[in-house]
Structure formats: C-alpha cells, structure tokens
Image (cartoon, helix red, strand yellow):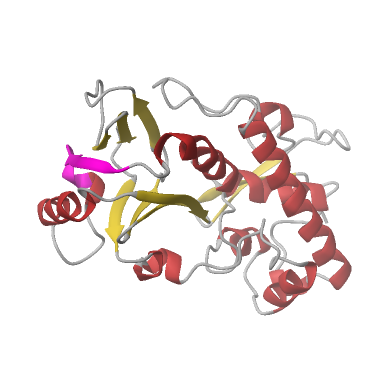
C-alpha cells in the first residue's frame, strides 16, 4: 500500500506532466473508482466528475497524508491509492491496458489505475470536504510535527503504540511498513500503550519517524516513478527495511529472531529482545 513516501514521490513525479495544464476531457471508464462512500451512486458520481473537471486547469499537485490532490481552478481531484492504485501517463489522448479514470490533456492523458478497484478518485469543491482529510492529523514531514506535539498526542491515547501510529486522525501518512520501522529504530515495544511512553522515548520515536520517512522518500525518488511504465513500481525499499516482513529472520541489531503478531487486523513485526 502506498504510504506517505510513495505518495509524495508520485506527487513530485506528476507535477511536470500536469501543472498549469488544462483537462480537456475526463472519462470515467470504471465508475466504481469514483463511487462515494455515501450519497449518490457510482454512475451519478462519474457523470458529475466528468462535468466538473472538463475544461479545468490544474493549478498545483499536493499531498495530504496518503492523499494526492490535484488543485484545479475550480475545485480539486482527490486520489487515494489504497492497496494497489497507481498513476500512468500516456503521450497521447488514447490509453491502453486497464485504466479506471482518464484525464485527457492536449499533450497526453493521465490515467488512474487500480485493477482491484480499491483506490478512489473524487472531485470536491475543496479537500476539506473529504471526511478523511477533514479529520486528518499532523503530517509527520511538516514543521508542525515536533517532538513536543508527538509527546502531547501520545499522552492522550491508551491504545497500543502500533495502532496509535496507524491512526490517520493523529498522524497522517504512516502505514504498516513505516510504523513497524519507526518503532524498531526507537527500540519501543509496539504493544505498549501510547500514553505509557516517557518524554525521552517520545523524542526517540519522533526522531525515528522523521528519519525513516525521509530515508524512504529518498529511496522512492531514486529512481523517480516512471509514470509511462505500467509495470514500474518502487524498487530498493527492501534495502532500507530493518524489520517489516522479516518474521523469523535475525534482527539486524541484536540477532534475535524477528517476531510477528497481529494488531488491529494488521501484521506487526518486531524484535522482542531489543524493543522494550
């Protein structure tokens, strides 16, 4: 699932293709991709999107948490990739292969693609009307994400630390991979209640979160996403991963076996020997 570093890499790669360009036509090929969580059905939402987007100029490409936002002259396009969503660029107004939503421009077409149909694209008058964005917590790569801010947030939650880190209402953009990695770097047991961390531990965790995300982003940008290649995906992340997906393998720090437990329906990978 694309998390903050992957979505930020998509945003940076996409800007040269679409910023200051006009969407001549929007084609919703698979209406399920624009289906709202409530209210109108998929077909009505598709027709509304095609109407709202036609003739709109893309003013900026931004990221909010795990959301990718195309700010238009009027309104915005809000994209969430969920598990397998991605973006493709076609150098003509024709598309090939599986494309859910196509945004045609004079010099090419941007395609939103998700063959499993979990990802979503919505038009909105502003990002804040999207419930997930309206409730979103602090961005961990923003200047607002300080050690003091994290300490305050931790103190208000009795949830296990892993579930706290996955809560987008608290910190926006961290998913299963980088939450595991940050806790390993900070040497903190994922089962501990968030409010049980000391001030010193909270500061260690803050440093670990920021460093893990920045390193992952650097990896995601070298090489940068190739939006013209339908088979392209992020490479090299396995070189920086220290604990995620390594059940039974030796901890890279203390050589004890990495364990896996279930928390909130997700797998948590950790070292019981050096994460206390």
Q: Nearer the viewer, residue 194 or 128?
A: 128
Left or right of residue 118: residue 59: right
Q: Residue shown at 60%/24% (left/top)?
A: 235
x and y, in percent, of residue 233 in the image: 50, 26
Residue 117 lies in quadrant: top left
What is the x, y in percent for residue 246? 68, 32
- Side of 232 where 146 appears, left or right: right
Residue 119: x %, y % from top left: 34, 45
Q: Residue at x 43, y 71 (%)?
A: 134
Q: Residue, x 69% and y 60% (percent of image)?
A: 191
Residue interval drawn in magenta: 22-32
- Name the residue: 70% across, 69% down: 194
Report whether residue 181 is seen.
Answer: no
User: Image quarter for residue 133?
Assistant: bottom left
**Residue 269 appears in the figure:** yes
Residue 11 on the magenta span: no
């Amino acid at each position: 699932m694309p998390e903050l570093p992957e979505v930020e890499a998509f945003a940076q790669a996409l800007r040269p293709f679409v910023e200051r360009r006009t969407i001549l036509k929007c084609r919703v090929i698979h209406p399920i991709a624009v289906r709202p969580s409530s209210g109108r059905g998929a077909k009505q939402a598709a027709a509304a999107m095609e109407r709202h987007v036609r003739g709109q100029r893309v003013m900026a490409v931004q990221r909010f948490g795990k959301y990718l936002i195309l700010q238009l002259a009027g309104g915005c396009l809000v994209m969430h990739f969920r598990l397998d969503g991605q973006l493709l660029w076609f150098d003509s107004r024709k598309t090939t292969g599986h494309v859910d939503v196509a945004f045609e421009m004079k010099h090419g077409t941007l395609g939103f693609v998700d063959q499993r149909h979990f990802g979503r694209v919505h038009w909105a008058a502003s990002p804040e009307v999207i419930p997930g964005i309206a409730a979103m917590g602090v961005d961990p790569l923003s200047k607002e994400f300080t050690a003091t801010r994290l300490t305050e947030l931790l103190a208000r939650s009795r949830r296990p630390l892993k579930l706290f880190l996955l809560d987008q209402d608290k910190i926006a953009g961290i998913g299963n991979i980088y939450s595991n990695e940050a806790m390993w770097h900070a040497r903190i047991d994922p089962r501990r209640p968030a409010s049980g961390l000391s001030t010193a531990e909270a500061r260690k965790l803050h440093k670990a979160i920021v460093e893990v995300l920045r390193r992952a982003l650097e990896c995601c940008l070298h090489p940068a996403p190739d939006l013209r290649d339908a088979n392209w995906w992020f490479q090299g992340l396995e070189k920086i991963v220290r604990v995620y997906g390594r059940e039974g393998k030796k901890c890279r720090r203390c050589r004890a076996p990495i364990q896996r437990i279930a928390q909130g329906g997700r797998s948590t990978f950790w070292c019981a020997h050096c994460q206390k």
